[in-house]
Structures are given as C-alpha cells and as structure tokens.
Image: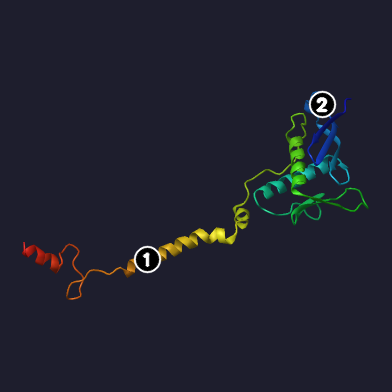
Amino acid sequence: MLNLSFRYDQTAVRLQVEGLPDFSAGHEDGVLGIISGWRLQLVASPELEGKREHLQALMATVLPYARHRISGVKRAFGDKTSAVVISPDGDKHQLLLRSSKANIPPLTLHLDHAELADLVRCLDALRLDPRVQVPWKLPIDHPLPRHELAERVPLPQRFGAPLIGGTALALIAGLSLSVPIPRNGEGTLFPTNSTTPEQTQSSSDR
C-alpha cells in the first residue's frame, strides 16, 4: 500500500505529514485519510513528532490563539490537562507541549511573531489541503464576544467620544443661558407676537 507524505514549508517552520488513504471512506489513491505520523521542525528548536491526536490538539490550540491575537485579544488556550497550551509571554508566545508517554517532562518553546505566523500558515495549509481528507475535530470559529473586543480598547478611546459630546452639550447650554432676553421698561417680558415700545413709537411717527 502506498504511503503518502505531504510537506508544508515556511521560512521558520516545516511540517511533514505521513499516512494512507482511507478506502473505507471512499478515498482514492493520492488522498490522505489516515495519519500515521507527523514531524514539525521549528528554527532553533528540537524536532517534534507525534500521532494524529497530538497534531489535532496543536491545531485546535494554536489556530484560535492566533485568531484572537489578530483581533487584539491576548489570552491563553489550553489548561493543565491539555496536550498543548499556548499563552502570551511578553513580546513572544509560549508553547507548552505535554507528551502522552510517562516520565517525559513537558517541552516549552518560545515563538516570536514571525515563527507563530509561519506555524499558523503551515497548519492552515494542512487543514485546507484537498489531498488531506482527515475529519479534524476543531472548534468552530464563532465571532469574538463583544466584551473581549471592548476590553482591548483603551479607556480614553472608549470613553473619549461620550465625554467630549457631554462637555460640548454643557457648554452650549451654558452659553444659551447667558444670552439676555428682551424686556420692556417695566422689567417684564415682551409678548412673543407683540412689538416693543420703540417699534410702536417708530410706527406712530410715520
């Protein structure tokens, strides 16, 4: 049976996936449906390898993390029981990988923005490759919650416009109150449709 091998290269990352067609799913020759192994090479980092579940965990963690970072949201993905955890680490990104084998300590890698971008491109290329018909179980890309997007907006920018609008309204109201209202000689207000004494005198002189 033909063993298939597909490789995805970027400047700082190389991902190679090996496997076989899944003939029970109707796959033809040249279509990879069963992953037997994969290898991931990062610049200045040890080579990583594993099974399909490890690769799926990597995709399910790194891809949504990168999507949130593009939207300006910094948050970690994965927990203490996850095979893969990625979190912000200053101006870099900390990637923690836990082995499924006993007595092997977790491996921690630190990626810069370029390395993370290259890793995302390789994972996306694999996920979208029509030659790879693997039923990935990945989280659905829902719109980001509004409160997460609001939290990334600085407070001055978030409240600046309402504050300026309120100040302008108060200023206009204060100016309108300072404009004198016409009054007659007795100090009372003139009727709206009446004429002032000066206007009456001018009319009688004509």
Position of residue 81 relative to residue 24, above or below, is below
Q: Quadrant of residue 35?
A: top right
Determine the residue located farthest toward the bottom in the rendered image: 186
Residue drawn 69% across the image and 50% down it:
69
Quadrant (top left, top right, bottom left, bottom right) of the N terminus = top right
Q: Earlier in the sequence, mark 1 or mark 2?
A: 2
- Tell me: 126 left or right of 18: left
- Tell me: 73 left or right of 78: left
Position of residue 163 relative to residue 62, above or below, is below
Q: Quadrant of residue 181?
A: bottom left
Residue 186 percent across, percent down from the top left: 17, 76
What residue is shown with label 1? 173
Crowdedness near tag 1: few (<14), some (14–19) or many (≥20) residues, C-alpha within 10 Å: few
Callout 1: SS? helix
Residue 114 percent across, percent down from the top left: 75, 45
Determine the residue located farthest toward the top in the rendered image: 29
Residue drawn 74% across the image and 44% down it:
117
- Tell me: 160 left or right of 152: left
- Tag 1: amino acid: Ala
Q: Nearer the viewer, residue 99 or 25?
A: 99
- Tag 2: amino acid: Phe
Callout 2: SS? helix
- Disc marking residue 23: 2
Residue 165 percent across, percent down from the top left: 45, 60
Q: Nearer the viewer, mark 1 or mark 2?
A: 1
Residue drawn 85% across the image and 32% down it:
19
